[in-house]
Amino acid sequence: MPLERGVMIAMGLSCNPKILIADEPTTALDVTTQAQLLELMKDMVQRFHASLVIVTHNLGVVARYAQRIYIMYAGRIVESGTTKDIFGNPRHPYTIGLLQCIPRLDEEEGRKLVPIEGLPPNLISMPSTCAFLPRCSYKVEKCAREPWPELSQVEGNHYIRCYVNTKEKAGEPKK
């Protein structure tokens, strides 16, 4: 592991924090070094009885190391749940789209990856309605009229910010 990252971790832990935030800690590292760094951080937070927040786009890292996941879109949490909830039963259209974009070892060979169509919103002039609306294949009329809903519980500790029950709409054709 590059010395600089090890030094940064040591500095972060030197004051015995209750929480350690790692923003894209594995960016530009090879797979072996990524694994070493993540294992080191995991061991250190256990040893120091701290919590670790990993901010990342790497869903492989998330699947392996996270206990709880917060999916964000346009600066807002759109879904939260355990790793099992998010990867096994995604409920927000954006989360569903993210998971359709990545290859998975547990799926059939030859599955086509499905991109999320459209562009993210301009964060300077955010709409009052759901920012994912122009890209959402599950949208309903209420989505265009109402402001973003609050996070609501779908089951257990699984929450989403959406008016649509994607499980009910899953069998309907995409718009």
Image (cartoon, rainbow, N blue to C red):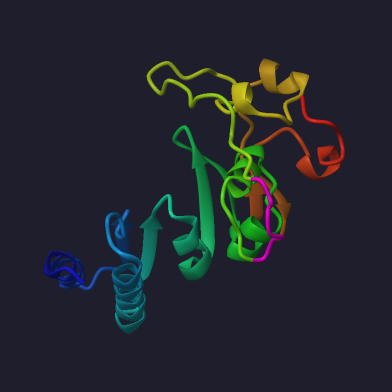
Q: Is residue 15 above or below residue 145?
A: below
**In the shown orientation, is residue 74 left or right of residue 13?**
right
Q: Is residue 167 above or below residue 172?
A: below
Say which residue appears at 63% left-offset and 40% top-offset.
Answer: 114
Q: Start and end of the magenta stretch?
A: 106-112
Q: Is residue 153 magenta?
A: no
Q: Position of residue 85 (x, y in %)?
A: 66, 60
Q: Nearer the viewer, residue 38 or 22?
A: 38
Q: Nearer the viewer, residue 27 or 44?
A: 27
Say which residue appears at 50% left-offset and 24% top-offset.
Answer: 119
Q: Position of residue 101 (x, y in %)?
A: 58, 45
**In the shown orientation, is residue 112 left or right of residue 72?**
right
> From the image, which quarter does the N terminus lie in?
bottom left
Q: Is residue 107 magenta?
A: yes
Asked whether residue 157 is in view, the answer is no
Say which residue appears at 58% left-offset and 55% top-offset.
Answer: 103
Q: Position of residue 45 (x, y in %)?
A: 33, 75
> From the image, which quarter does the C terminus lie in?
top right
Say which residue appears at 66% left-offset and 46% top-offset.
Answer: 112
Q: Main secondary structure of the magenta part?
A: loop
Asked whether residue 2 is in view, the answer is yes
